Image (cartoon, rainbow, N blue to C red):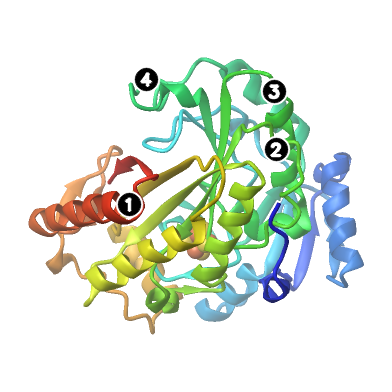
Amino acid sequence: MDRPAPREQRLRSWRPRQLLITRSAREHAHGRAIAERAAARGIPVTELPGNQLRLGLPEDERRAYAAAKSTLAVVNAPPSKLRLQPIAPSADWRVDLAEGCPAHCAYCYLAGSLKGPPITRVYANLDEITAALLPYLGQGRITSRSAARAHEGTTFEASCYTDPLALEPLTGSLAALIRFFGAWEADVQLRFTSKFADVSSLLDLPHGGRTRMRASINPPGYHRFEAGTDPVAARLRALRRMAAAGYKVGLTIAPIIAADGWRDAYAALIAAAATQLRDVPNLDLTAELITHRFTPGSRAVLASWYPGSDLEMDPEQRAEKRTKFAGTKFVYPPELMKELKAFFHEELAATLPQARILYWT
Ligand code: SF4
């Protein structure tokens, strides 16, 4: 099994400025363990008297953002989270271990979907979350109904509202979920994707081949859009280590950004992935291809969070589409979409033919 190279020691490990834990979360051993781990690292822990998160954020929008982003709250997943939702095109069902993320990506899709200040909330009632999965076995309507993907079993995606690996050193939630799937003797698959690279605590877990980790990647030149994440080269090394440890793996190339020079940049990225994954025995590799898009709401939030970003989010340069919730989203125009799609399919086939493309969007 691949072991950490010395440079892997310098990977990001989030250190929030404070941790808040609610009364109900303290009733769960998992919640208490998270608070204890934070306290042992010198992070101030506040035990809230009830279940409301009252932050007393500053009036100033920038300072309020910074205060919220540096706060970790340990709460219980509400009952609505225990009734799973389908998550097309990734998986049959969404399983949430947390909501929010410590990174600062200029395109973050959470900006349009999460309400309120961007505090990261991690869930303490992990036992209830895992118990809630059982009735969904065999009930999938997304990948289970796809002729090309039904062999994956009932799929559960853990990266919809967070980057679970970013929180793992403090929570241990992802490792617990991987163990749960490892012990679940059924046709199921846990999926997660990450822009982080510290996988050291996951390598030796009894995963049973029922987890697929994907590295979420973009060319190194786009790292300015992904503040607070690990470098893409480290993410690819992490993926190699996971593959060598017997995990199923994948690439989430997302969001695909058609900035100047995109062809060369993405060709080099795919070549880097091919080099990194070369010679991994029994490699089970997929690719998911997601183009950059935004909504009027996410654009406004991101413009307020990252006013200095040079990421293009100009509706005039985009095609307007309806979302499934009757809203509006802006995607690349059809001609450019066609060009991008052809490029990625051809480039992957030529450079990384082991990668099975699961979807393009
Ligand atoms: Fe958002 Fe993912 Fe970036 Fe976190 S890593 S800020 S979830 S895009």
Please tell me which residue is depicted at 88% across the width and 41% down the height of the picture: 29
* CA neighbours of label 4 inside 10 A, class few (<14), some (14 to 19), many (20+): some
Does any portion of residue 100 appear in the rendered image? no
Q: Quadrant of residue 228?
A: bottom right
- Which residue lies under the disc numbered 1? 290
Locate residue 289 relative to residue 330 in the image: left or right: right
Please provide percent x and percent y for residue 349. 28, 49
Q: Which secondary structure lies at badge 2?
A: helix
Please provide percent x and percent y for residue 6. 72, 74
Please tell me which residue is depicted at 27% across the width and 46% down the height of the picture: 361
Real-space Cα distance between discs 3 and 1?
30 Å
- Which residue lies under the disc numbered 3? 184
Real-space Cα distance between discs 1 and 4?
21 Å
Q: Which secondary structure lies at badge 1?
A: strand
Q: Which secondary structure lies at badge 3?
A: loop
- Which residue lies under the disc numbered 2? 177
